[in-house]
Image (cartoon, rainbow, N blue to C red):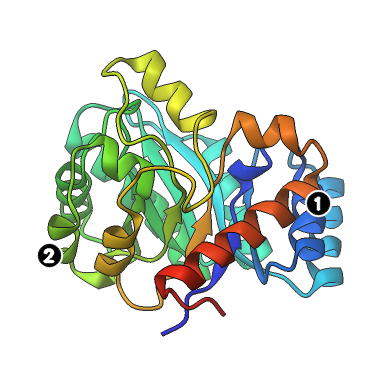
Amino acid sequence: MDHILSLAAGTLPEFRPNQIADAAGQAGFSHVGFTIEPKQWTPEQARATMAAIKQHGLSVLDVEVVWIPEGGELTDDHRLIVDAGAELGAPNILVVSAEPNPDRTAAALHQLCEWAAPANIRVSLEFLMITAVQSLDSALDIVARCDHPAAAVLIDSLHFQRAGHSATSLKAVDGNLLAYSQICDGNLQCSDDFDSYLEDAIDLRSVPGEGSLPLVDILAALPPAIPLSLEVRSKAYRDRYPDPVARATAVREKSLAYFDTVGVSIR
């Protein structure tokens, strides 16, 4: 079955949502994702983004990122991101948590799901080593405690590797809990400290096929036809391709070539 391939906002982190939509459309993507910064998400920015989406006939895959803060208390800014997702027609919202108590994180996740559900949005909790939720098991436990049909878990191939997981553990996950996945390549190993994990996540990713992650195994373990968000957050690509259209085009073309080589079908 064929996968949707979406341009993740993290591939173009220095650009505004309307610029990301324009780059995604010119590069040939069918789907796109956005980082919503509440203080910058003005009516003018929303209109410009919607216009770019319409111009290129794009669909929105996701918006990000809702940070559940330490203490678990949500604010109007968190609600704004959910509302922006609904306005843009996004079926997914990405969430991470700084709250170490799983019950408080689950309660906040449940509230986000309550806000998102009327717009048929899934709320995907991502695990990564620079947050309080650092493993697939922890994320699954929180989603179970949340007990809401809109709640899901996000698999990011880089963070999946950093958590020490294998494709075998992924195959055991209920596919209904996986609404979409973030895909990139990267180094096989990373030093076990916060600064290294942060640099790894925001600067050292690469296009699928250019690194050492076991992507073939991860892709095979994901549900068939799960949408893939291409998050190549890479300093090397930012330096090599400062123009957003050129960067989006490069990561798409190189990724499609890799997916064709390994037998992964993209729409």
Q: Is residue 120 visible?
A: no
Q: Viewer-proximal residue, 195 or 87? A: 195
Q: CA distance from mark 1 to mark 2?
A: 38 Å
Amino acid beneath label 1: Val
Q: Is residue 256 visible?
A: yes
Residue for point 50% across, 37% down: 205
Label 1 with label 2: CB-CB less than 8 Å? no
Residue at which label 2 appears: 172
Q: Which mark is residue 254?
A: none
Residue for point 35% across, 55% down: 215
Q: Secondary structure at mark 1?
A: helix
Question: Quadrant of the image for the N terminus?
Answer: bottom left
Residue for point 81% across, 51% down: 245
Q: Earlier in the sequence, mark 1 or mark 2?
A: 2
Question: Quadrant of the image for the C terminus?
Answer: bottom right
Query: Dividing the picture into quarters, in which one does residue 150 lie?
Result: bottom left
Q: Viewer-proximal residue, 81 or 91? A: 91
Q: Would residue 233 appear left or right of 93 to someone viewing this image?
A: right
Q: Position of residue 169 (x, y in %)?
A: 13, 56
Q: Viewer-proximal residue, 99 or 63? A: 63
Q: Would residue 54 appear left or right of 188 to someone viewing this image?
A: right
Q: Crowding near pointer 2: few (<14 within 10 Å), some, many (20+)?
A: few
Amino acid beneath label 2: Ala
Q: Viewer-proximal residue, 183 or 71? A: 183
Query: Dividing the picture into quarters, in which one does residue 243 lie?
Result: top right
Q: Position of residue 249 (x, y in %)?
A: 73, 56
Residue occupying the far front of the picture: 261
Residue occupying the far bottom of the picture: 1
Q: Secondary structure at mark 2?
A: loop
Residue at which label 1 appears: 245
Q: Would residue 248 appear left or right of 89 to someone viewing this image?
A: right
Residue for point 48% across, 67% down: 259
